[in-house]
Image (spheres, coloured by chain):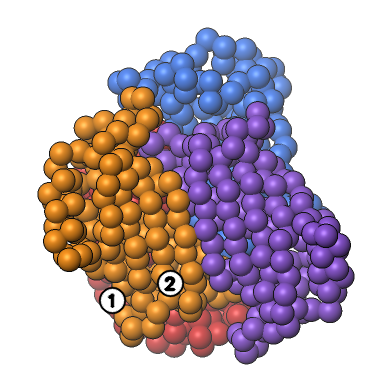
Chain colours: A blue, B red, C orange, D purple
Amino acid sequence: MLTFSTSIRVRYGETDQMGFCYYGNYAQFLEVGRVEALRSCGFSYKELESQGILLPVRSFSIKYVSPAKYDDILEIQTSITKIEGTRIEFSYVVKTSEGILIANAETELVFVSANSLRPIPMPEKFKKLVQKIDGNNK
Amino acid sequence: MLTFSTSIRVRYGETDQMGFCYYGNYAQFLEVGRVEALRSCGFSYKELESQGILLPVRSFSIKYVSPAKYDDILEIQTSITKIEGTRIEFSYVVKTSEGILIANAETELVFVSANSLRPIPMPEKFKKLVQKIDGNNK
Amino acid sequence: MLTFSTSIRVRYGETDQMGFCYYGNYAQFLEVGRVEALRSCGFSYKELESQGILLPVRSFSIKYVSPAKYDDILEIQTSITKIEGTRIEFSYVVKTSEGILIANAETELVFVSANSLRPIPMPEKFKKLVQKIDGNNK
Amino acid sequence: MLTFSTSIRVRYGETDQMGFCYYGNYAQFLEVGRVEALRSCGFSYKELESQGILLPVRSFSIKYVSPAKYDDILEIQTSITKIEGTRIEFSYVVKTSEGILIANAETELVFVSANSLRPIPMPEKFKKLVQKIDGNNK
């Protein structure tokens, strides 16, 4: 497993009238987490798209453990757990800066051709990542 | 199972540069689905809150089957699948108005006291719903 | 002036911890208002885009008069106030279903070529709208 | 004028199918700008709220000069332009990290009592800020 960490601060507009961060905003936080994880591995998601490769989310699941509050700094620990064939999987741990567990989540994404919108094999450059992950998992 | 249907139209601001509805917006669509489902059963979520009862989401999972596009009218079929103790579960089928399956999802919510932020037994009025669900499941 | 009315219901995810609809969500409500206003005039914004014409917002101003609350049904009265050269202007009045004034707003949009991203003269079909507006303003 | 600078990176979910940052997201960026500007002056907006003082936006206007794109780092220069009676005004310049002007904006906010929801005079601590602004404006 390759794990990376990035931080975001909960914006006022991301709270709801319960006084907590709205449950629907985490999808965006996780997007930030995995984009930064890929950047740490030398991949710019922006560049990937400019080469005609899209990475839509195929499935997403999340458990909300504690509510996050306005102005909290959340640490998003993102792990690339699997790259295989046309798919890439990420898992996430979201914590406050004091270490309180906020949420656990997982997403599965698919490499897709921007032209055909059909799944395509992962780009060559990603294969090195696979080896790193396999190495770490042993 | 009690099933209800509500429609939303994908807004321009809900698309992303892939040209599809952003994966993070579905959480809000499902929220609309379950609020309207509860309203159909005679429950106003707004009223519930004014009585000191919150219903935060505890877990959420979704599978994206086909992408939704700008201006699509999405039908959200919401089922109340379980009410037990302090929890209520919903499942959702999202389709276009032409019947194309967009997504399947599930959420688990908890009845929580607004004062203590601790789980509380479901309000009395909900017990009738339990009976209806049990009756339908037989 | 040509005026059209459309309704939206404030979603839970659109509130903030002040207990009101977040000020940043109105931009999306107004987008719904003008898309529906154009649809009433026989223009599908979606179709416009598929013909290579974009309509980005050039300026936007809003006065918040009263706060909107969760579950409020807001009526958005959208007027096309000006179409001239490469620009189209809309003004908006947002009210609750009980008639309480929530906000007044204005936006200016530009007809832009999707290819060049440069302003282009309004499409021919819009010229009839200009005449209607001029007729009404007399 | 007191001016402060903060940066945000445009998220994927903040783009729309035009391929640019959606016009409605800037309200949230400006919120981040002014919260950080206040923090630089020694004011935590979170603390202000916990003392029963709200700061809702009363008016907001923005001119979009160039479109921002996905993954752009935007610098938000926030100036406190006026504090008087019950109101505080901010102006904003949004630029890319390469210095391209993206937008100019202004907001007017009101000090409001969380209990009565009525305007209240600015808190004592803000009066020092007034003097600084007046000093700088001379």
The residue under label 1 is B40
The residue under label 2 is C103
Find the distance from the CA under tag 2 to the CA under tag 1: 30 Å
Q: In which quarter of the image is the C terminus of chain D?
A: bottom right
Is residue D2 or residue B49 the one in the foreground?
D2
Looking at the image, is A6 positioned above or below residue D40? above
Q: Where is residue D67 in the image (x, y as percent from the top left)?
A: 49, 37
Instruction: Say if mark 2 contacts mark 1, CB within 8 Å.
Output: no
Q: Where is residue C125 in the image (x, y as percent from the top left)?
A: 14, 42
Q: Which corner quadrant of the image does residue C133 belong to?
A: bottom left
Is residue B104 or residue A98 the one in the foreground?
A98
- Is disc 2 surrounded by few (<14), some (14 to 19) or many (20+) residues within 10 Å? many
Q: In this view, does D32 lie to the left or right of C109?
A: right
Q: Is mark 1 on a helix, strand or loop?
A: helix
Q: Quadrant of the N terminus of chain D?
A: bottom right
Q: Which corner quadrant of the image does residue D39 belong to?
A: bottom right
**Do we see residue A74 in this rendering?**
yes
Looking at the image, is A73 positioned above or below residue D73? below
